[in-house]
Image (cartoon, helix red, strand yellow):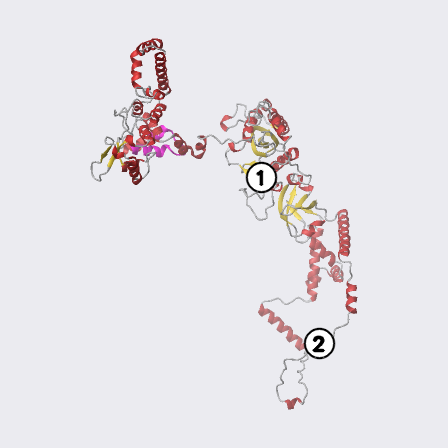
Amino acid sequence: MSDVAQPKQIWWSVSELAEARLPGLPGTRQRINALAKRQQWTSYADKARRKVGGGGGWEYHWTLLPLEARARLLKDASAGAAIDAIAQSSLDLAERHYAFEQLSERAKQTARKRLRILNAVMAQEAAGLGKDIAVREVARAEGCAARSIWNWFDKVLGVERSDWLPCLADGRGLVRRDSGRKEIDPEFMEVFKADYLRFEGPGISSAYRRAVRVCEAQGIECPPESRLRRHLDAEVPRVSQIYQREGLTGLQKCYPPQIRDRTGMTAMEGVNADCHKFDVFVQWEGRDKPARAQLVAFQDIYSGKILSWRIDHTPNKVMVMAAFGDMIDNFGIPKHALFDNGREFANKWLTGGADTRFRFKIREDDPLGVLALLGIDIHWATPGHGQAKPIERAFRDLAEDIAKDPRFAGAYVGNRPDAKPENYGSRAIPIDDFIAIVAEGIDAHNARQGRLSQTANGRSFDETFAASYANAPIRKAAIEQRRLWLMGQEPRKLHANHGELTLFKNKYWADWMAEHAGQQIVARFNPADLHSGAEIYDLKGRYLGFAACREAVGFFDLTEAHDKARQDGQIRRAQKQLAQAINPGSVKDVATRLDELAPEEPAAAEARVVRPTFGDPAQTDGASVRKPALPTPDTSPEAQSEHSAFVHVFYGKQGRKKPETVEDEARSRFRRALDVEARSEAGERIGEAEAKWLQSYQETPEYRQLRNMYEKFGERLLLG
C-alpha cells in the first residue's frame, strides 16, 4: 500500500486513540483495551506491534479500527490519498463510496463513462466475441485507446462488479496539492480576528492594515492580504463570521424561517393585526404641515383577507379598538388574536388582564380588557421579527399597489430617507381622498385572483374566506357586548357620598350610583364624544348601568334650579315610597306594645361589701355624717375685678388666647356670611357646602338681628 493511500498516522497507541475521539471507538483507554482484547487485535502479527520506549504497551495498525474510525482518518487525510485508496482492493466498500462522493461532478462523469465502456465489452463478450476483439470493437466505437480499456479492467480486478464505479475514478477532481506555502502566524490571526469579527463590521482591508501595523511593531510576520481571506474562511466558518459581525439578526438570516401550516384552520379561527405607515404625504384637517398616515388592519390568518382597518395620525388604542369593533360587527368574534408588543395593542382597553402582557404597569384592580371579556386567546409575536406576523406580507403589497398609485404622484416620499423621489414634498393628498383610495386598494387586494398560498390555491382572498366562512362555526356578538369595543375604559372610584363619577374633568351621575358610593368601578366611554355618557361596570366586568354627563349650569339659572328641585323631589318621593315598602311598621306601634307589657319587679339588691364607719361613734350620736356645705361665691365688684386680673395673667402665662364669648362667636358667623355674600355678588364660584350654610344661616333670628344692626352701625358692629 502506497503512502498516498494511507492516513497521516498509520500506527496508533491506546492512549492516542482515546485522545483522538474517533467515531466508532470508546472514549477511554480501558474500554479500548477491552475492545482490542475482544476482537483479538494482537493476533494479527503484521498489524500489531510492541510499543518502543517507556511505558510499553501495544500499537495497532489503522486498518484494525472500526469502519467509522477509518472513514474519519481518510477524510482527514489528503483528497488524493483517499482517491488512490479507492483503487486499492484493501479498502472496504464504505470507504470507496465515501471517497467517490468527494469527487467533482466532472470526475464522476468520467468514471461513469469508463464503467459504460467496460459494460459494453462485457456484453459483447457474453454474446460470443473474444475479449480482445470486444475491447478493440468498443474502443473503435467510443474513440478511445484499447490499452486504456485494458488498464481500466486492471483497476477493477478482483472487485465486485457493483463496486466498479468508485474504482474507475482517478480522483483528479478532488486532489488538493500542498504547494508548501507557509501557515499564517497565529498571533497575527488573533489580532486580525479581534478587529474584524465585531459588530461594527469593519472591512477586511482596513482590519488587515491595522493588524499589520500592530504586528510589525512586535516583529510578527505578516502574510499578504490576498491569502488572508482564504485562510479566514478555512479557519472560521461562514455562519460564525456572520454571527460575530451581525449578531442574532444576521444569524437568523442563515437559517430558513419556520413554515406554519394553515390548512387545518378555518375562517375567523385566528386573526392578526399590525400597523403600517404609508409612504405618502397626507393633508390633515386642522394641521398646517402634511404628515404620513398610519394604518391599523386586522387580517384573517386562514385566508389572508384584510377584515377591517382604520387610519389615523399615529398608532393609538382608539383606532385599534375601532378597527377591532368593525371586524366583530361584520364577521364575528375570533378564537385567537396575534399581536406584536406595541403600545397600541398591549393597552389595557384591549388586552387588560392578560397574563402575558408585558406593557404598562400591572395592578391588582386592573379591569379586564375586551379580548379577555370576549374569551379571545391572545398571542404575542416576536418583537422586531416581521416573519412572525402574516400581515406583514400584505403590507408589502399595499406599499407597492397603494402608496405608488398614480393618484398619489407628487405625494410619495420614498420608503427610506435616501430613496426620496425628485418631486418629494411637491403635493399632499387630502385625508378624505386618501381614505377613499386606500379603501379601493384594500378591496382590490382582497379580490385579486391567482393567490398561491396554501389555502387559496389560485383563488382570491375573498373567495377563500367566503368558502370557509360559510361552514365555520362563527361566534356573533350580542347587542350588549358592542359596548365593550365601541368605548375606552378607565378605572375610577365613585364619590364617597353620592357616587358621582369624575372622568377627564367631566361629571357623570345617575340615581342608582348612590348605592355604589365609594366603590372602584370601570367606566367605558366613547373617546370621541365624552359628553355622550358612560357605561359603568364593576372590576369583574359586570354591567351596572348608564351614567349621563352632567353639564355645569349658571349660578342664577332659574330653569335649571327648578329642574334640579323637581329631580330632588322625585328622588325624595321615590325614597319615601321605598322606605314605606321596606319598613311599613310605625314606631308608635312599637311604643304602645312596650307600654302594654307588665313591668318586671326588679330583684332586691343585696350589699356584699359593707363600708366601715371611722371616728368616735359617740360624737355622731347615731346620726349620719354630713358633708360640709359649699362656700357661697363672692359677687362684690372688688372680687370680680380680682377674678378678671387673674384670668388675664393666667392666659398670658400659658400663651393662649382668651376664649371668645357667645357674642364674639355670633359676630364671627355674621362676618363669614358677609364674606360669602360679597364673593357671590362678585361672580366668584361658591362651593355647594358654603351655599347651603349661607341659605340656612340667613333664616336664623341671629342673622336678621345682626343684619339690622349692621345697616345702622356699619363696620363698627364687627369691631366689638
Q: Position of residue 364 (x, y in %)?
A: 57, 48
Q: Disc 2 designates what residue?
A: 603
Q: Is residue 686 visible?
A: no
Q: Is residue 191 magenta?
A: yes
Image quadrant containing the C terminus: bottom right
Rendered location of residue 226, percent (x, y): 32, 25
Name the residue type under label 1. Asp
Residue 122 appears at what percent x and percent y?
35, 14
Q: Is residue 206 left or right of residue 536?
A: left
Identify the disc placed on residue 377. 1
Sequence-first disc among 2 and 1: 1
Residue 148 versus residue 522: which sits nearer the camera?
Answer: 148
Amino acid on which disc 2 is placed: Ala
x 63%, y 82%: residue? 611
Residue 177 vs residue 4, the one in the foreground: 4
Compared to 127, does 254 lie above or below? below
Q: Residues within 10 Å of mark 1 (few under 14, many from 20)?
A: some
Residue 459: image tag: none
Residue 29 part of the magenta-drawn span: no
Question: Label 2 neighbourhood size at 10 Å, few (<14), some (14-19), many (20+)?
Answer: few
Instruction: Pick whichever, 61 or 171, lies toward us.
Output: 61
Residues rendered magenta in the picture: 185-208
Residue at point 61% right, 87% down? 615
**Image quarter of the N terminus:** top left
Would you identify the image quadrant in which residue 143 lies? Answer: top left
Label 1: state its secondary structure.
strand
- Image quarter of residue 665: bottom right
Q: Is residue 106 visible?
A: yes
Dominant secondary structure (helix, strand or loop) of the stretch shown in magenta: helix
